[in-house]
Amino acid sequence: EGMIEVFKWKQMDFHNRGDGSNGPVVGIGPVRKPVPSEDLPIVFPGRYGRDRKKRDVITSRDVNPIGISARTITSNDDTPYIAYNNVPMGATHFQGRLFVTMPRRRVGIPSTLNFIDMRREGKQGSSPKLYAYPDFETNQFNHSSRNLVSVYRTTVDDCQRLWFIDTGMLEYPNNRQQIRRPSIWIVDLKTDRVIKRFDIPESIAETGRGLASLTIDIENKRDCSAAYAYIPDLVYRRLYVYSLAQNRMWSFEHNYFNFDPLAGDLDIGDQTFRWDDGIFSITLGPHQNDGSRSVYFHPMASNNEFVVSNRVLQLESNAARSDHGNDFRVLGSRGEKKQSTMHVYDPRTQVVFYDEIQTNGVGCWNTKKPFSAANHGTVVANAREMIYPSDLTIDADGTIWVMTNSMPIFIYSTLETDVYNFRIWKQNVHEAKRNTVCE
Ligand SMILES: O=C1C=C2C[C@@H](C(=O)O)NC2=CC1=O
């Protein structure tokens, strides 16, 4: 039971800060230059920027929260590395590389997609520096319209591909700039080559701000082209489906994607605030006899869990329905103060593991038992060291990885730079459920 602390940082640092301050980049040999596929559209910055007339979605977080010190928003945009501004968000492990994302919510972030080389810098309890992925240049949004702008979370599919969404947005406080179309990227982890990039049409998502995660559904590993990506949009409260085979995307709307107004009051890291984040995380159950899978989902500002069949999502014509009948179902409430960012179903234990942001820990539900508050267990709760679990992923070996990043303190107060603000935890799925109701 419990989780094992793997890394901890007071502030994040990079092998290449982009300012030459840390000398020549001691790389692990040149990561192969990604060859973008030919159908990459050229996107001209500014075309989707301020000149668009659409009313922006105004939420509680648009007003600069009281007390935010101006020091974190420097005027000179071209400072490549400002340690304080680097707040990590996502953690995904694959064969000795731990991918860590750094969404660009402030200036001074050298690279938004990174990894830790576990073989060379995996010493437990250390604070390893990050390598840019797939390389430093691809992370320089101001060098080319083909480069990465801002990535929140990543996921690895059954075909050893890394998927993620570039929001295309510089999310600076009170100065959000959509400088590129948001786009879905696929990188082949055997070659580190970008094998696909799909620009999300404006007809689907006006901006990329709410595209903080995605989940990949593959019918069977023998046909890696038959993949669907399910993408929750926490701002516009929609569920997008991208079919790789058809290279098309469609959008579902449903009341269950909305946040619960009675569950928006949060108290995390001594900060009390109100969020209105809608549908946030999607995870897939096992293939059932008819080949279909349950798609579990929840809004972040909510205690409830919902489910829909992947067959419903995979049929584009369903997206246009004004009424979805009983296709989307409510499973119930996990209990009070059980708001969750990311969750993942583990096929080995048939347990769903949740990041829980008010209990500062990880919860669980054994899907073989009825969905009820009583059947939701606690793997760990640690208000001192696990403030704001922002990501939870499970790798091919059945190891759970959790990132905790103190995000509410960064947003509503000021991080202390002499304490450990960011940590990555791990635990084997069987160990994690031991001595809990999820056993
Ligand atoms: O974990 C996340 C939390 C939030 C809050 C909201 C914001 O902009 O403050 N957007 C988020 C995205 C996340 O990934």
Image (tube, rainbow, N blue to C red):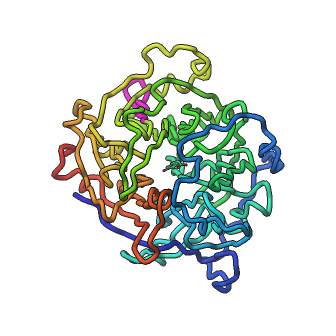
Image position, residue 229 (x, y; %)? 56, 38
Q: Quadrant of residue 56?
A: top right
On the rendered image, what quadrant is the C terminus found in? Answer: top left
Q: Is residue 264 left or right of residue 369?
A: right
Q: At 67% across and 68% down in the image, what residue appears?
A: 74
Residue 289: in magenta span: yes
Kindly tell me whether residue 227 is visible in this rendering. no
Residue ranking furthest to the front: 66
Residue ranking furthest to the bottom: 23
The magenta stretch is 287-298
Image position, residue 139 (x, y; %)? 69, 63
Q: At 29% across and 47% down in the image, what residue appears?
A: 363
For this rendering, which residue is in front, 333 or 97?
Answer: 333
Q: Is residue 409 left or right of residue 143?
A: left
On the rendered image, what quadrant is the N terminus found in? Answer: bottom left
Is 53 situated above or below 128? above
Is 86 situated above or below 1? below
Image position, residue 376 (x, y; %)? 24, 40
Q: Quadrant of residue 109?
A: bottom right
Kindly tell me whether residue 120 is visible in this rendering. yes
For this rendering, which residue is in front, 296 or 172?
Answer: 172
Residue 294: in magenta span: yes
Q: Quadrant of residue 223?
A: top right
